[in-house]
Amino acid sequence: MLTRGIELYDPFDLTIEERIFLGAKRACAGFAVVALTISGLDLMNIRPLENVAEFINEHQHTRLADWPDLIRDGIHQISITPPASVVVAIPGDGLAMESLPALSPPSVVTAKADASPVAALAAARREDAIKVAMASPPTLARATVADLAQRAQDMAREARDMATPEETNAPGRPEAPAVMQLASIDPGALPAAGAPQPAVIRISLPDRIAVLPPRAPGVPPPSPAQRLHLEGAARAKAERCLANAVYFEARDQPYRGQVAVAQVVMNRVFSGTYPHDVCGVIYQNATHHLACQFTFACDGKRKTINEFGAWARARRIARETLDGQLYVQAVGTATHYHATYVHPGWVHEMHRLAREGIHLFYRPYALGSGANEPVWSREQLAANKQQLAANSGKR
């Protein structure tokens, strides 16, 4: 037994401490790669962790046995096929249909109803209108000015031949012109026979065209930056202050929670109770230790930005909030919030509106519902109008 134990011993093998140290190094390297990957995706506006969190929240009541099917369906919906493209040739000069409808009575053109592109689109109720329109496009032929003039003369001659002698000699009937001419045609500008035609313009169009939804009627509401007349240096200063509030107050929160913090700042700006500028609201009473409106402004700690991915997201949220592109309808006109692990005494004077992440959002009863305050969300404006209509109907 002693001999076998000596033979199995390898003096060059790693000790237990070295193995633990090597495993720790590998784990740290793996965490670093994951962190860099998540930061890079965040800079490219790709948020995998938030998408996973939203997916879990939406299906939190789903049975555990159904999770593999949900994940499999999500994988099937992912498409990495690059969009194809088609090349469309558009002549540089005038376009004309390859065949013209025949004339029945004078000045009346008849055509089959089913040959109209509009009729084809109207008949395709359950099909994609874009595919129907692009499936069988009308054939376009190059038409020169001389061809148009010749066709106009043929149409005039056919109309004159179809008229009866009585109609032609009827008193008061104007004589048909011998030749129908187009007012925009200059005989001297007609191209000679065999002259080179203009080059064909080729453009590339995507094979899959995403049809945008129609815009809602009416003028969109002004953005917060437009209401505050922020331009140039004033806009940059307000955007930096708002980004500081988002970063230092909620950089570890979900995306909606960070947007909600920026929305609270803007609600205070428009409330009339707080300063009427972004930086004034955020740094109000900043000289009073732990007695200001936002804790990061007066906690006495040095403010350094170390998480550059979170800072880039805070800058983007601040910019899009000032531009009126972000609005959390559940938060609405909230002006206060606090974390779930604290219990301030002022919550008894507040109406709780929503929870985003670890923050609970409130609005004081004394400030009213905020129906008359500026709202930069078109959906929220429509909801407010419906609420006012319902209240007036109850009265």
Image (cartoon, helix red, strand yellow):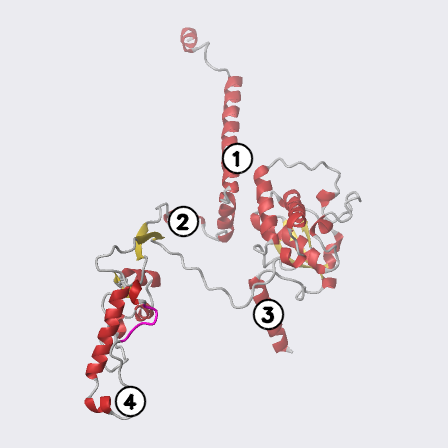
Q: CA distance from mark 4 to mark 2?
A: 75 Å
Q: Residue 180, how many percent across, how many down?
A: 27, 75
Between discs 3 and 1, the one toward the N terminus? 1
Check residue 385 in the rendering and tell me which mark sits there, or answer none.
Answer: 3
326 and 328: which is toward the camera = 326
Q: Give the foreground label among 4 and 3.
A: 4
Is the N terminus in the top left, top right, bottom left or bottom right quadrant? top left
Which residue sits at x=48%, y=15%? 14
Between discs 2 and 1, the one toward the N terminus? 1
Label 1 belongs to which residue? 35
The span shown in magenta is 180-185
Label 2 belongs to which residue? 74
Label 4 belongs to which residue? 173
> What residue type is disc 2 on?
Gly
Q: Secondary structure at mark 1?
A: helix
Between discs 4 and 2, the one toward the N terminus? 2
Q: Secondary structure at mark 4?
A: loop
> What residue type is disc 3 on?
Lys
